[in-house]
Image (tube, helix red, strand yellow):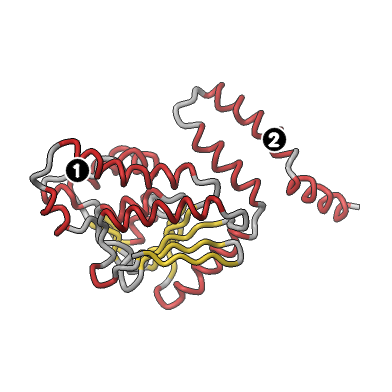
Amino acid sequence: MILYHAESGVARITLNRPEKRNALNASLIAAVHESLARSARDADVKVVVISGAGSDFCSGADLSGLDQTASEGVMSHLETARAMADVFLAIRHHPHPVVAVVRGRALAGGCGLATSCDLIVANESAQFGYPEVKIGFVPAMVMAILRRSVSEKRAFELVATGEIISAAQAHAAGLISRVFPDAEFDVRAEEYIAALASKSSSAVTLSKNLLYHMDGMTFEAAIEAGVHGNALARMTEDARHGIERFVKKSE
């Protein structure tokens, strides 16, 4: 269900159920979680990429699986929901940037998975949406991330109407990071990932950690956290080498 490969500082997690448009079931969610943990343990990894095999990123939850669990009790439903929440948290707490590379459709839970990533790059024909409302369901957990990515009113409109939007619309709303032409997508996405992997790993890790820990802080507390982050960054090997190179160029 998952293809995992790590090379040149990039760990690639590929959802591998193309015949089901990479629909999420318990086994796939567990495999994604384990792959994220595996990449976090790998000292050579600088960037993690999540993509989907075939023509779509992910169509959401496997509806056949949902049908089978419809009669289960609340504790079972809580366990199922928590498994997906653990994936979102694993991405948020991952030491390195996690990039969703989206081709085709990223819908419902699939859009939630993409949204939970630190960055999203998509081809111009990609589609995004949270259509859960159309079957009486709620994209509940991802709202915590969505409302941090787009305006509150746009977030509510997306979840309340189930609107499917284009990559261009998603980019304009601030939901995704970059849109590349279909014909150039593979090359441009790889260039983007390689450029990210070339940056100082310690600087990117510290930046991600600090940015997300500022959630809920007062302005004063966030500035103070920045003071400590600034001092810590200066002590890293990457910073020392970077300063040395800068001084030599200036001489």
Q: Observer-nearest residue: 127 or 198?
A: 198
Residue 230, percent across and down?
Answer: 68, 34
Q: Secondary structure at mark 1?
A: loop
Kindly identify which residue carries mark 1.
138
- 10 Å neighbourhood of mark 2: few (<14), some, or many (≥20)? few
Q: Are marks 1 and 2 in contact (CB under 8 Å)?
A: no
Residue 98, percent across and down?
Answer: 48, 53
Q: Quadrant of residue 225?
A: top right
- 10 Å neighbourhood of mark 1: few (<14), some, or many (≥20)? some
Q: Observer-nearest residue: 13 or 178?
A: 13
Left of 215 or right of it: where is 137?
A: left
Q: Quadrant of residue 25?
A: bottom left
Q: Is residue 137 above or below residue 129?
A: above
Q: Residue furthest left?
A: 71
Kindly identify which residue carries mark 2.
232
Q: Quadrant of residue 183?
A: bottom left
Q: Is residue 183 above or below residue 204?
A: below
